[in-house]
Image (tube, helix red, strand yellow):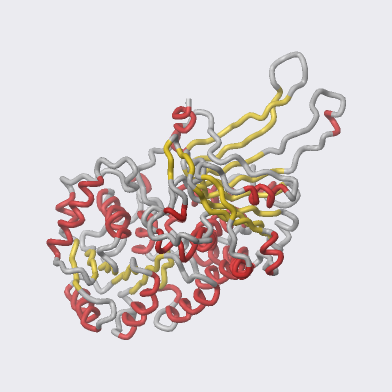
């Protein structure tokens, strides 16, 4: 659901939103700015209350002041995801903010929550678990023991869970079992902020609202599909977390599999939560489970070394803070998958993600089979290039089509040209964290952009063979910062006679092209 005023979206009903882990980065950098954006566009009920919960000493006033100081410091930061904060409007928003000092493991904390709900004008409550993953199930169980998850006819209770949803198939199953033991599936909102991005949601619209595309969206016309999430940043301050997880766990079963599902699902019967999530679960369940040997053969792992980015030297992964000096954790992963259904039989999917790559680029590249060559056998054209449809998620959000055209002149020479749609040319895109849409949907009870238990488990089931294969062979190939991955990734796709689509390829008329001129 778009959150701009032009969408004429209805205001959600009043509720109290509890933010567990209120002193953490997620709350101050993303959640509160996103709620503030909804407030400024008139999409928060006047009675909505926001209650931070943490063990850090504080009260309502110190909580408000802490957030105001942080947002003021961020106001001039061009990389701040939420954009500028209008501090003149801040006091009106800040009156909604409350604070409970309490330990997640202590019964008194939940008694304070109960009193806060009883004092509010509504009994609706949402509990956002913006904590370390090890607390997810414990907090949910304590909410259940305190009777805080019981719903009534005019009273909802919802729990919002951040990724990661487990670290392998067994832990994902265990987490789902514990959550579902104290609440129903319709009360659980498993958040992947990637799905809040407008261009991710537009994948479905591009496919199913345009008759031009869907008839070609199958193995008769598509040769292969590549999904890329390239980052120029390193692990920053996440070394302790990242070194225990790596690129595969951090990105593939959530972000990349969500893009895979969007681009590959069958048409849902309706655009509602049940229909769409059922198709996603079926799609991920149709990924062929590789044997350990197949998983090893169909994957590549890399780790960035010291190198140069944008003309500046950057350290290698093992020199980053809180990273083991002998670490084999992958900062780059490429895998090949196949989907065993009629639509995609014989079409390989290549997924890759990495840090410290040459450009920031998240895209879906759909490569069509080349046209028959017979008509050109007596011309100067020696081969026909494949057409690509590029769905650009970030940056330069849009859709681009590469196709062949005749180069001007007396002879028949072909050249690949580009035709495209850039979001910024048609729509005013406000600064967004991606959380605005998801928070709004939580408040309205729309689960379409949230993952169901079976979808989570099907994703981990497809990833598990790679995890098992790498236990026996934990080596990672090095690549210099600023490169687009290790040579083994090129070998992975090259064995099939294909090449990776260029990372960070400039698009005509975009800011990226202008910046590079």
Q: Nearer the viewer, residue 102 or 83?
A: 102
Tell me where residue 307 appears, x and y as whole percent: 49, 42
For this orientation, the residue located farthest to the bottom is: 145
Residue 134 placement, left or right of 205: left
Location of residue 170 (image quadrant):
bottom right
Residue 447 in sight from this viewpoint: yes
Residue 284 spot, x, y in % from top left: 61, 64
User: Which quadrant is home to the N terminus?
Assistant: bottom left
Task: Report the front residue among 239 and 461.
Answer: 239
Q: Position of residue 281 (x, y in %)?
A: 58, 67
Q: Residue 98 appears in which quarter of the rendering? A: bottom left
**x 36%, y 71%: residue:** 159
Query: What is the total number of numbered labels drawn onto the structure image?
Result: 0
Residue at point 44% right, 32% down? Answer: 511
Which residue of the protein is positioned furthest toward the left in this rendering?
A: 61
Vertical position of residue 49 compared to residue 384: above or below = below
Look at the picture and state if 109 lies above or below 33: below
Residue nearest the observer in this picture, 22 or 45 = 22
Please indicate, yes or no, whether residue 215 appears anywhere in the rendered image: no
| 416, 147: nearer the viewer | 416
Kindly identify the residue that appears in the image at 63 percent across and 29 percent down.
417
Q: Is residue 206 above or below residue 45?
A: above
Give the farthest residue toward the front.
Answer: 325
Image spot of residue 336 (x, y percent): 66, 56
């Amino acid at each position: 659901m778009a959150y701009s005023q032009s969408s004429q979206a209805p205001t959600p009903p009043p509720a109290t939103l509890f933010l567990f882990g209120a002193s953490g980065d997620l709350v101050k950098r993303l959640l509160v700015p996103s709620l503030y954006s909804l407030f400024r566009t008139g999409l928060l009920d006047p009675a909505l209350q926001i209650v931070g919960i943490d063990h850090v000493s504080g009260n309502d006033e110190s909580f408000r002041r802490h957030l105001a100081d942080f947002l003021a410091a961020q106001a001039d930061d061009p990389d701040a995801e939420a954009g500028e904060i209008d501090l003149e409007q801040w006091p009106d928003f800040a009156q909604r903010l409350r604070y409970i000092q309490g330990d997640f493991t202590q019964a008194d904390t939940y008694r304070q929550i109960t009193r806060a709900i009883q004092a509010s004008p509504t009994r609706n409550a949402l509990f956002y678990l913006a904590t370390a993953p090890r607390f997810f199930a414990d907090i949910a169980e304590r909410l259940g023991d305190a009777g805080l998850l019981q719903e009534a006819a005019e009273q909802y209770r919802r729990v919002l869970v951040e990724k990661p949803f487990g670290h392998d198939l067994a832990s994902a199953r265990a987490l789902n079992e514990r959550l579902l033991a104290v609440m129903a599936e319709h009360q659980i909102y498993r958040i992947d902020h990637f799905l809040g991005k407008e261009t991710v949601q537009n994948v479905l619209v591009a496919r199913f609202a345009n008759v031009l595309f869907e008839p070609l969206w199958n193995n008769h016309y598509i040769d292969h599909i590549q999904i890329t999430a390239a980052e120029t940043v390193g692990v920053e301050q996440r070394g302790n977390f990242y070194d225990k997880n790596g690129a595969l766990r951090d990105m593939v079963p959530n972000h990349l599999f969500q893009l895979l599902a969007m681009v590959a699902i069958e048409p849902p019967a309706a655009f509602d939560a049940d229909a769409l999530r059922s198709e996603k679960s079926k799609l991920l369940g149709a990924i062929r489970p590789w044997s350990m040997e197949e998983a090893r053969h169909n994957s590549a792992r890399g780790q960035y070394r010291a190198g140069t980015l944008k003309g500046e030297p950057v350290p290698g992964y093992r020199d980053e803070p809180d990273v083991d000096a002998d670490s084999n954790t992958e900062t780059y992963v490429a895998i090949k998958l196949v989907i065993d259904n009629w639509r995609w039989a014989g079409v390989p999917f290549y997924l890759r993600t990495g840090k410290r790559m040459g450009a920031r680029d998240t895209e879906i590249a759909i490569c069509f089979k080349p046209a028959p060559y017979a008509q050109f056998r007596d011309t100067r054209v020696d081969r026909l290039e494949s057409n690509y449809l590029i769905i650009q998620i970030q940056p330069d959000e849009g859709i681009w089509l590469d196709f062949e055209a005749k180069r001007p002149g007396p002879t028949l020479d072909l050249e690949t040209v580009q035709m495209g749609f850039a979001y910024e040319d048609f729509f005013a895109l406000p600064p967004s964290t991606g959380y605005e849409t998801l928070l709004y949907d939580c408040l309205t009870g729309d689960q379409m952009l949230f993952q169901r238990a079976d979808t989570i488990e099907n994703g981990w089931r497809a990833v598990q063979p790679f995890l098992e294969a790498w236990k026996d062979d934990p080596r990672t190939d090095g690549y210099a910062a600023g490169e687009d991955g290790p040579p083994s990734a090129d070998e992975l796709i090259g064995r099939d006679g294909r090449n990776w689509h260029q990372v960070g390829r400039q698009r005509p008329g975009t800011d990226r092209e202008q910046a590079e001129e």
